[in-house]
Image: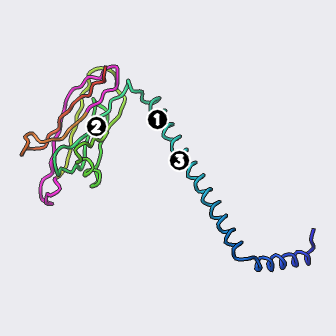
Amino acid sequence: MLNRRGRKAFGLLVACLTGLLPPAFAAQADAQTGAQSLKMDQVVQALKDEVLEFNREAQAIENEALLPAHARVSVYLGVKVSGLLLDEVSVMIDEQRPVVYRYDAADARALLNETSLQRILRTPIANGAHRIRVSFTGHFADDKAEDPPVIDSFEAVFDKGLQEAELELTIARERRIAGKPKISMKQWRAGR
């Protein structure tokens, strides 16, 4: 064990030797440190990716346990009217509380893509006949502030069998050239 005077001398010796190290050795040490840092970053990123994958799998298992496929209905929405930007959509099944989705500009524009569908509801329901009520409010991209909003509502009955019920709601024009945007519904059937 070094005494106080010995520690001071040792520190001075280390400082002198460090100053005498050739610059190439210092550069090599920096390169090794950089390589180690890069390797550590890669390990950390791999761990983050594993955690994200684990969370996705855990969420899927939890969803399946809490909401098994045979006991749920999924409702999807598509917009087939050029320039129609949705402000709000409300969906209600039977007497459940309505689910309301409010759109910002980016979400409303994303739905204008020809193949875009958005799942706006997934909920458990029993087998049998159910009533769905849907309404929307929107506006056209080139509307003026004083133009009235575009609105429509829709009501229908669908049958929930032993498998998941999947409903596609489409907002389209009544007539190809002109006409008020209307909601229609299609129920997807499971392949047999």
Q: What element carries label 3?
A: helix
Question: What kind of residue is marked 3?
Answer: Asp
Q: Quadrant of the N terminus?
A: bottom right
Kind of residue sitting beneath label 1:
Ala
Q: Dividing the image into 4 quarters, which one contains the C terminus?
A: top left
Please identify, in this view, whether the residue under mark 2 or under mark 3 is nearer the observer: 3
Residue 114, image x and y in percent?
A: 22, 44
Of the residues under marks 2 and 3, which one precedes in the sequence? 3
Looking at the image, residue 16 sits to the left or right of residue 189; the answer is: right
Residue 138 coordinates in the image, percent (x, y): 19, 49
- Which residue does the image show at 32% across and 37% down from the upper left? 121
**Spatial CA span between label 2 and label 3:** 30 Å
Report if residue 143 lies within the magenta region.
yes
Numbered range of the magenta stretch: 140-167
**Are discs 2 and 3 less than 8 Å apart at CB?**
no
x and y, in percent, of residue 190 in the image: 30, 24
Give the residue type at disc 2.
Answer: Tyr
- Quarter of the rendering containing residue 115: top left
Q: Give the color scheme: rainbow, by chain, secondary structure or one colour.
A: rainbow
What residue appears at the point 24 percent right and 28 percent down from the top-left corner?
187
State how far apart marks 1 and 3 are (Cα). Answer: 17 Å
Q: Which mark is residue 60?
A: 1
Residue for badge 2: 76
